Image: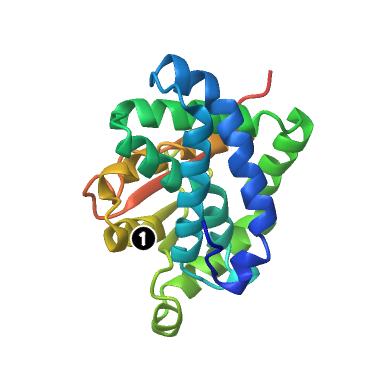
């Protein structure tokens, strides 16, 4: 497949993203054989990498390193490519979700526990909460939305009296939802949402969420607290 050019920011990270995609496919191989009953794994690999080329060219630019959401796109958008290919091969949505979640968890756990927990402490830190407040405020401005119409829009949520979470984020507009609507990926979108829980749990963070934009709610209600240490 001919090389498809993506935004320069994503092109600069292409190598690392492609390595991550190949690692995911390695981790998923047994499940693709045993659960999805796919035999031509080499063919599936090539289809996924070809589809990832397309997804990469479709990924919206939302500010690069200046926006925390750029990292979300780079870490998770490859699962859109996996989902598209598996759907074409008749794999059910529920099984795709199971394969992707188990694969992502296994990939996250290749990072040392010490490094993962340090990342979690940084995310929960007061310094990062200050950054989240600032970026949440910026995301809601008219100028930011005009410059980056495909970006997320969100509010920082302070805990109230009796709340057991440390802080929260209400996503009122989701970049993944916008992407899915633009490219016809709505049915596979909930599987992408399901990856969030392991992404935080493996870093020592409890995510509570009872509704999502992808599920038809007015916003996604993320609530964060620290998991008890052993």
State the scheme by which the image is colored.
rainbow
Residue indicated by mark 1: 179
In the image, is residue 87 above or below residue 92? below
Q: Quadrant of residue 126?
A: bottom right
Question: What secondary structure is marked by label 1?
Answer: helix
In the image, is residue 105 above or below residue 5? above
Q: Position of residue 73 (x, y in %)?
A: 51, 56
In the image, is residue 195 above or below residue 12? above
Q: For the point 31% across and 39% down, which residue is it?
A: 88
Q: For the point 41% across and 23% down, which residue is it?
A: 38
**Left/right of residue 79 with respect to residue 113 in the rendered view:** left
Q: Position of residue 87 (x, y in %)?
A: 31, 37
Other residues around mark 1 within 10 Å, as few (<14) / some (14–19) / many (≥20): many
Q: Quadrant of the C terminus?
A: top right
Q: Nearer the viewer, residue 94 or 228?
A: 94
In the image, is residue 72 above or below residue 208? below
Q: Position of residue 156 (x, y in %)?
A: 47, 59
Q: Is residue 202 visible?
A: no
Q: Nearer the viewer, residue 147 or 200?
A: 147
Q: Position of residue 163 (x, y in %)?
A: 43, 40
Residue farthest to the left?
A: 216
Q: Nearer the viewer, residue 59 or 167?
A: 59
**Left/right of residue 34 with respect to residue 42 in the rendered view:** left
**Left/right of residue 139 with respect to residue 106 in the rendered view:** left
Q: For the point 39% across and 18% down, which residue is it?
A: 37
Q: Is residue 49 visible?
A: yes
Total marks placed: 1
């Amino acid at each position: 497949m001919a090389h498809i050019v993506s935004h320069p920011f994503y092109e600069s990270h292409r190598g690392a993203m492609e390595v991550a995609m190949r690692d995911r496919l390695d981790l998923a191989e047994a499940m693709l054989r045993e659960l999805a009953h796919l035999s031509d794994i080499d063919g599936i690999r090539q289809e996924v990498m070809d589809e990832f080329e397309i997804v990469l060219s479709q990924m919206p630019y939302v500010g690069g390193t200046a926006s925390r959401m750029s990292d979300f796109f780079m870490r998770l958008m490859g699962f859109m490519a996996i989902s598209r290919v598996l759907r074409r091969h008749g794999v059910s949505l529920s099984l795709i979700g199971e394969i992707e979640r188990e694969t992502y968890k296994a990939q996250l756990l290749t990072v040392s526990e010490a490094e993962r927990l340090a990342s979690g402490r940084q995310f929960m830190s007061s310094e990062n909460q200050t950054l989240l407040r600032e970026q949440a405020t910026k995301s809601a401005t008219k100028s930011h939305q005009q410059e980056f119409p495909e970006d997320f829009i969100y509010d920082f949520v302070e805990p109230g009296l009796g709340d057991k979470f440390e802080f929260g984020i209400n996503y009122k507009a989701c970049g993944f939802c916008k992407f899915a609507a633009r490219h016809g990926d709505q049915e596979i979108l909930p599987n992408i949402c399901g990856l969030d829980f392991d992404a935080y749990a493996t870093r020592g963070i409890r995510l509570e969420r009872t509704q999502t934009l992808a599920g038809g709610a007015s916003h996604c209600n993320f609530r964060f607290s620290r998991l008890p240490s052993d």
